[in-house]
Amino acid sequence: MAPVQASAENTPAKQALMLASNQTHHGVGTVTAIDNKAKKIELKHGPIKSIGWMGMKMYFAVDDAELLDEVEVGDKVDFDFIETRDKRYVITDIEAQ
């Protein structure tokens, strides 16, 4: 069976989120916690210039819970996220390095 790529490019949830956002941001970090039930992931990430952030540890929501199945605590990851109209930061793609 072929591995599933951790991407939610064509899901209705991502399409709806993208309508609420005008920019996708990219970050690199380490997974510090995963909350499957709440569809959240905590990352310790480096600076993200496109949104003006310094490095920090924070929780992000995910638009597709299956994205959480592709990473584990301790993994170094590349991730893309958007800021929704209601000021939530939602990961739309994540991949272990």
Image: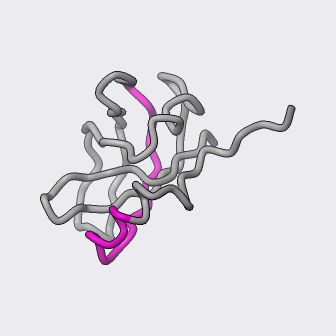
Residue at 17% x, 65% y: name it: 85
Q: Which image quadrant is residue 10 in?
A: bottom right
The residue range painted magenta reads 16-34
Image quadrant holding the C terminus, namely: top right
Residue 86, horizontal then vertical, whole percent: 13, 59
Residue 59, horizontal then vertical, whole percent: 27, 37
Residue 43 against residue 55 in the figure, above or below = above
Residue 54 against residue 76 in the figure, above or below = below
In front of the other: 88 or 77 = 88
Residue at 48% x, 22% y: name it: 73
Residue 53 against residue 50 in the figure, above or below = above
Image quadrant holding the N terminus, namely: top right
Q: How is the image coloured?
A: one colour
Per the image, is 8 magenta?
A: no
- Residue extending furthest toward the right: 1
Residue 13 horizontal side relative to residue 75, left or right: left
Residue 49, horizontal then vertical, whole percent: 32, 68
Per the image, is 30 magenta?
A: yes
Residue at 39% x, 24% y: name it: 36
In front of the other: 42 or 10 = 10
- Residue extending furthest toward the bottom: 22
Residue 3 against residue 79 in the figure, above or below = above
In front of the other: 86 or 59 = 86
Residue 43, horizontal then vertical, whole percent: 36, 36
Residue at 35% x, 32% y: name it: 39
- Residue extending furthest toward the front: 12
Q: Which image quadrant is residue 48 in?
A: bottom left
